[in-house]
Image (cartoon, rainbow, N blue to C red):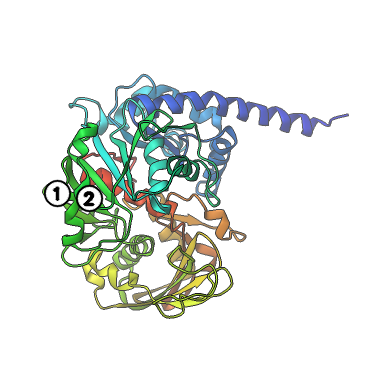
Amino acid sequence: MTSHLEEQYQASWQERQTFAENMQPIIGQLFRNKGLEVSIYGRPLVNASAIDIIKAHKSVALHEESKLRLRESFPFIDALRHMDLAPARIDVGKLAYRYLFLGKANGLSIEQFLEKELVSINKNTDPQKSKDVVLYGFGRIGRLLARLLIERAGPCSTLNLRAIVIRPSGKGDLAKRASLLRRDSVHGAFNGSITIDEENSVIKANGAFIQVIYAKNPSEIDYTQYGINDALVVDNTGVWSDEEGLGQHLQSKGVAKVLLTAPAKGDIKNIVYGVNQDMILADDKIVSAASCTTNAITPVLKAINDEFGIKNGHVETVHSYTNDQNLIDNYHPAPRRGRSAPLNMVISTTGAAKAVAKALPELKGLLTGNAIRVPTPNVSMAIMNLNLKKSTDKEALNDYLRNISLNSTLQNQVDYTASTEIVSTDLVGSRYAGVVDSQATIVDGDRAVLYVWYDNEFGYSCQVVRVMLEMSGIQVPTLPVN
């Protein structure tokens, strides 16, 4: 015999699940047909399960005084279907909350309110041209970039994955490459369907038709013979990091620009999206997306420096092992890296602290850094010990960073957690550059220690896609900004 409370709970749950299931096709259509990426307080809803949509709504209570129910947000998502909007990231949760609880309605209907709030993306201009993309290399970052680009495939796609370039290999190579894209030990199964065309050397995935090109170096390739023109080549190989090496791509027919997914040498601009993407000019041919660690720490450092000032500090990176290390003890040219990665903590070096200055010149010479490689396959942490110019306390510092994560131009880079139980595996798949662990924050006057988690594979890849959009002149604003 069920109690009244049990019946009430079950009815409430069924209502939530029904609304979530009704939202799913609308969210998918908005993304595929209009290029609108819907979220709830920063939690993306595109390709989310019904349970994920429910959990995203539940997270609102962590930031606001009132809950946001699915039946309250549904009319806002539904209203977007009937609006003529340019591609954008729209936080429906924030808009709904403002309308329902913060007195922003002012007598307007939901439709009128959205028209007012989203006026900057009214579709009154020519559609943005899509960009052909080539992934040169297909390792950890290359495959995650492929997943992210395939996820965006559709009528409103602005970045079209046209080809993957890999070194010649043996028989069955295409099937093995497709299998690595299909299954991932860290990030799980690919969300969709993948088939291969051996005769034409093509991978077909969720509507994306991806040419696989075998070549030993860029000079061998004529992309135009595959119908690829004015392409952005994303170099994931790590073989070249200077202008001379990366410039080889520009000698290939059909290539317009090159993006390196690693720190660059020389005068190549190192970009941390959210911090210095404005440095990218229309005539820049080669750009670097810096490193995963630089992307994780720079947005947080910028936020801290803007408000409190940084006199100096030290950044210690606790980093998951990478393919550069050895599975078992064996020769390696770098100190200590020859020792077994899954069995040891390995003290190493990182240039991330110094690299911050390339994106944030005001911190030049103020930071030192070191790294410890640890026996985990993914998700790393940066521990930032900072001496500030202005004294504060833990509550004030955390409140400031929480607000940065919700209501600033860094909201897509900085995430924030107040969980007392979170561990590294909980952050696999995070789309943020870094996640501030507020429970670990230490503040003593003008000294602060911050702990920032980051998915050094997926979170970094999301940052790379943002730089790709910027290099391609494609604008995808986030609304509301604050």
What residue is at 48 percent from the left and 63 percent from the top?
Answer: 380
Q: Residue furthest bottom?
A: 335
Q: Position of residue 120 (x, y in %)?
A: 24, 33
**Is 296 positioned to the left or the right of 318 in the image?**
left
Give how far across and how far down residue 81 sits, in percent.
39, 21
Q: Where's residue 258, x and y in %?
A: 21, 50
Q: Residue at x 35, y 31 (%)?
A: 200
Number of callouts in the render?
2
**In the drawing, does residue 299 fall left or right of residue 320?**
left
Three-letter code for the amino acid on which mark 1 is drawn: Gln
Q: Nearer the viewer, residue 455 or 255?
A: 255
Badge 2 amino acid:
Pro
The residue that mark 1 highlights is 251
Marks 1 & 2, CB-CB < 8 Å contact: yes
Q: Quadrant location of residue 311? A: bottom left
Question: Residue 193 bears which disc, if any?
Answer: none
For residue 220, above or below residue 392: above
Q: Is residue 187 above or below residue 308?
A: above
Q: In the displayed structure, would residue 309 be above or below residue 158?
A: below
Secondary structure of the residue carrying numbered label 1: helix
**Is residue 127 in sight in this rendering?**
yes
Please rate how many residues cluster around mark 1, counting C-alpha atoms within 10 Å: few if below 14, some from 14 to 19, many from 20. some
Residue extending farthest right: 1
